[in-house]
Image: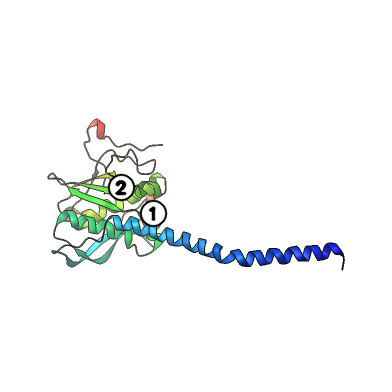
Amino acid sequence: MPRLWKIAIALLAVLAFAALLTFPSLLRSVLGLRRADRTEEQARRAIVPPISTPTDTREKAQLFWLSPTSPDTLEPTAVELDLSADVEKRAKQLITALIESPPSQTQRTLPADAVLLQFYLMSDGTGIADFSETLDTETPSGILNEEIAVDSIVRTLGANLSNVYRLRILIRGQEADTLAGHLDLSGFFNVTPQAQAQPAATGVANGERPLAASPLNASPSPEQQPAIRN
């Protein structure tokens, strides 16, 4: 056998032996990265532990996710949840379920890693929903996607609460100009309470946008005037 062939075979043998030696550590590194990702996601969830109150009762709720048969259309799904008699905690439970429990990933309206940090209800019926930054960074950019995300929250609140009349969305306790670059978050979104609820399923067929039944404040002040950012 030519000398060069012998050298090549010897080099290949050395490389194969080196690969066998390094493979376990490489595998451990990959598994470590996966565990780190899970740990990071668990840490995000741990920011807000599961909400449970002494007044919780098992009830049927209407949550709005994307229709499985009609893309870009929201429709209600009846689910059983442990819901508090306290309005603020009840709203938080509803929105958390909206994030964490969609019937399927294709029906999801809010990012899986989004966290509702807090929900406050003012005396005039204004709800303040304070989300983690992932609502902003992981919502697909585009006016339709952003409208669907917000409208799913608005309709879920309206279908299950009778004393929340409008909604303001904050990101990490701060006012945000837009959700993901288009939908204006500087104003308020009207919430239609359960007693006045309009037909449930809505969509974007025939040019109708999901927010049509929950527009921003009907008579906003100039600084609250909604706009769509290009």
- Rendered location of residue 15, percent (x, y): 69, 63
Crowd rating for badge 1 (residues with CA inside 10 Å; few <14, some 14–19, many 20+): many
Q: From this viewpoint, is residue 198 visible? A: no
Please state if 152 lies on the left or on the right of 59 as rendered.
right
Quickly name the residue at label 2. Answer: 211
Where is residue 146? Give x, y as percent: 36, 47
Name the residue located 15 percent from the left edge and 45 percent from the top edge: 122
The amino acid sitting under disc 1 is Asp
Which scheme is used to colour this image of the protein?
A: rainbow
Amino acid of disc 2: Leu
Q: Which residue is mark 1?
A: 72
Residue at left 56%, top 66%? Answer: 24
Residue 16 lies, in percent from the top left, at: 68, 66
Q: From the viewer's perspective, is residue 80 above or below residue 46?
A: below
SS at mark 1 in the image = loop
* Depth order, front residue of 49/186: 49
Question: Of 50 and 106, which appears nearest the observer?
Answer: 50
33 relative to 44 in the view: left or right: right
Q: Earlier in the sequence, mark 1 or mark 2?
A: 1
**Mark 2 surroundings: few (<14), some (14-19) or many (≥20) residues within 10 A:** many
Q: Is residue 51 in view?
A: yes
